Amino acid sequence: MKILYKLLKQDPSSREGIISVTSVLGILANLLIAAVKVVIGLLASSIAIMSEGVNNASDALTSVLALIGTKLAGKHPDEKHPFGYGRIEYLTSLVIAILILVTGVEMLTSSVKLVFAPEEMSISILSLVIIAASALIKFFLGIYTIRMGKKADSSTLEAVGIECRNDSFISVITILSAVIFLVFRLSIDAYVGIFTSLIIIKAGLEVLRDTVGDLLGRPGEKELANKLYKEIRSTDGILNAADMMLHNYGPDAYSGSVNVEIDQSKSVGDVYQFLHELQLRIMHEYHVTMVFGVYAVDNDRENSKEFRRMVGQFVTSHEHVKSFHAVYLDPHSDKLYCDLVVDYNLRDWEPLKEEFSAYMKEKCPDKTLELTIETEFV
């Protein structure tokens, strides 16, 4: 692999390098297997072996798609796509998912036909040996490709690996059904084909589901959000952070927004200084373009501290309320602001709103509550 990285002039630690080299490896492996099968098929006058070779040559197409998708996704942002072309990788995964599904459906159709119109099996030891060798190579290639896809966070590469691994399963099941026929003269080829095709269709639907989810837009990755929250909350001057939203524009490109709580005594200049430094740090380290909203926190007046304590007591006594923020008493009016964060199991928010409003009315009868109830966005 090191030689391949050097020949292709790719960095083994970079995402593009991993995807490019793994894709090229898949292309070379499939073409090599295809060439061997076609040559042996010609020498042995076996149409079955030659057909297997042609099938392997077409398998190289998925690796080509992964390679092209990665190159296109790496294009620089422009006026039409200011956040870049990263989502092209998702379109590539969509095409591969469709190819997997087409393979599964075609195999299912052929197998069902065989159930009602059985054909005499024609098997040679040579063809079984070649299929077995091919299955072994494709199994390890598939496992390696899936592992590299996870390492590079590439759904396209994972889809290629899944298809490659499925091919090896098909070959193994084909060999088993052939052995059963040779030993017992019992043909189960059609039923094995139905079983295998359903496995392939299931894998294709899973790839399709994940890809469509990426295209439609998922909530930002929880792991990334937790890292960002940790980074933000550890910044001097920021008391807390909430309401984070992350929008995905490719596997390693995000834009986002988050609200931060800051002591109201801080000047605009102070706030600008540490938020701007934090924004640049997040962009460079996490590849996220982050926009900040600001909540003022009054830590000087005792009644403001008391209000936070009251809200905290309410939150700890309710299992569906995860946290609170944005508690602020307007010094120029009787308004008290507060945001409650609830989990997704709480479907009806109205009883909670009424209960909390009554609770605060009892504690602070002279204040007007401005309540916002929300869920975590990531």
Image (spheres, rainbow, N blue to C red):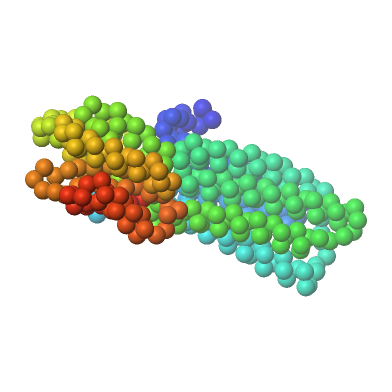
Residue 290 visible within the image: no
Residue 119 visible within the image: yes
Q: Could you say where residue 311 lies in the image, as x and y percent from the top left?
A: 30, 42
In the rendered image, the residue lying farthest to the bottom is 116
Q: Note whether 278 is above or below 202 in the view shown.
A: above
Q: Residue at x 34, y 32 (%)?
A: 230
Q: Could you say where residue 146 lies in the image, as x and y percent from the top left?
A: 55, 41
Please give the count of numbered marks on the rendered protein: 0
Q: Residue at x 30, y 28 (%)?
A: 234
Q: Residue at x 55, y 58 (%)?
A: 205
Query: In the depicted view, which residue is nearer to us: 164 or 134?
Result: 164
Q: Note whether 288 is above or below 127 in the view shown.
A: above
Q: Residue at x 23, y 32 (%)?
A: 238
Q: Note whether 203 is above or below 75 in the view shown.
A: below
In the rendered image, the residue lying farthest to the right is 184
Query: In the depicted view, which residue is nearer to us: 248 or 168?
Result: 248
Residue 271 picture quarter: top left
Quadrant of the snapshot with the N terminus: top right
Residue 317 picture quarter: top left
In the rendered image, the residue lying farthest to the left is 332
Q: Could you say where residue 94 lies in the image, as x and y percent from the top left?
A: 47, 56
Query: In the depicted view, which residue is nearer to us: 83 or 17?
Result: 83
Relative to 218, 159 lies left or right: right
Q: Could you say where residue 219 lies in the image, as x and y percent from the top left?
A: 39, 49
